[in-house]
Amino acid sequence: MSIETEPNSAAVVLPTEQRWERRAVIDLSAIRHNVRRIAELAAPAQIMAVVKADGYGHGALPVAKAALEAGATWLGTAHATEALELRAAGITAPVLAWLHTTDTPFAEAIAANIDLGVSGWDLDHIAAAARTAAQPARVHLKIDTGLGRNGCTPEGWRELLAAAAAYQEEGVLRVVGVFSHLAVADEPERPETDEQLAAFRAAVALAEEAGFGLEVRHTANTPAILSRPDAHFDLVRLGLGMYGLSPFADQTSADLGLRPAMRLVARVANAKRVPAGQGISYGLTYRTAGPTTVALVPLGYADGIPRTAQAAPVLIAGVLRRSSGRVAMDQFVVDMGEDADPADLIGAEAVLFGDGGPAAEAWAASAGTINYEMVTRISGRVPRHYVEGSWGEHGE
């Protein structure tokens, strides 16, 4: 409910508990729904909820708690520091961190019972840290099956297994998992996934022949969970799908039975009438075709809105329009049309993407990027607001 400050004022003042300028509204019930949906598809494999990059921009701790409540049994982060933050917040579930540098706090991670991915060079560092921590490290050996990023090459795999076996015999670590990462699972028709899975199975077989009692074998990301049951093994890593977004170009979230969890909104900061030919924003790349009303949305590239976005969809006061001109650091402009009344727009809700508005994929398309980037790039200047259930039930 809104309250007019003065009979003739266009400014709208909301009750204190409802005041906000911009925010990302996160529906934790959607997170739970998506975890349960994927768990049905992946069973009997366990679910690792991937909460790296601050939970893909949704908030790592609230998402982790919701995912564990919904049946996830593992958490995944890129960096050990991300995993340590979860431990500091009281999360005790198994956590795997897999992207390291020579400055990674291995000893602290081991002492906090964080599992560590190993690609090769890091094995010696982890073993040394385990001695410092006076506690054996739990490690997952990573085989590069074709993505060409992290992981041990097939040519070096036997050597890595031998080195890990020696450290395990010494008692400074225990190999509990083997994992890899798929390159083109979001394009199910491509043959490289078959090749990668064959290479993964071969690497697992060699690890088992070396005497390692593996607890988990894992390589499936969200697209592989959805399209390749033969990639599920013991554990699947649920990232994008947990946040309700589709990894496929030809299938929507709804097609997959998923619910987007983030809704990005702002209050219109200004609105005014302008004449025909009015240039809009830096570079004057957009000019109005006729007399019109323009609205100012207080979100810009400092908030994570791509500067490259062109004619991106925005729902303002229930009307779908397109962004006009360049996105600036703090704001962008929307041409609302000749019939729009500025007095009706100031303080109105502008929905960039999420429930009841455009899809994150539409903004991604306007900026020449992917939905993964749209949600993860929303900056800390945008407050996160957590709700349960449908937006309408919470006045969103």
Image: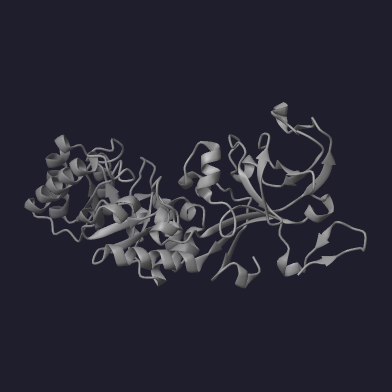
The answer to which of 14 and 337 lies nearer the viewer is 337
Residue 229 placement (x, y as % from top left): 23, 56
Work out which quarter of the rendered image holds the N terminus and state it.
Answer: bottom right
Q: Please name the residue shown 37% across and 68% down the image.
A: 36
* Quadrant where the image shows the C terminus: bottom right
* Residue 246 appears anywhere in the view: yes
Residue located 35% across and 70% down the image: 71
| Vertical arrangement, residue 190 with respect to residue 4, above or below | above
* Residue 135 in view in this figure: no
Indicate the position of residue 280 as horizontal and vertical percent values.
74, 33
Count of numbered circles on the image: 0
Q: To which quarter of the image does residue 162 belong?
A: top left
Determine whether 373 is above or below 394 in the image. Answer: above
Residue that sits furthest to the left in the current view:
209
Report the residue at 59% width, 67% height from top.
391
Closest to the observer, 200 or 89: 200
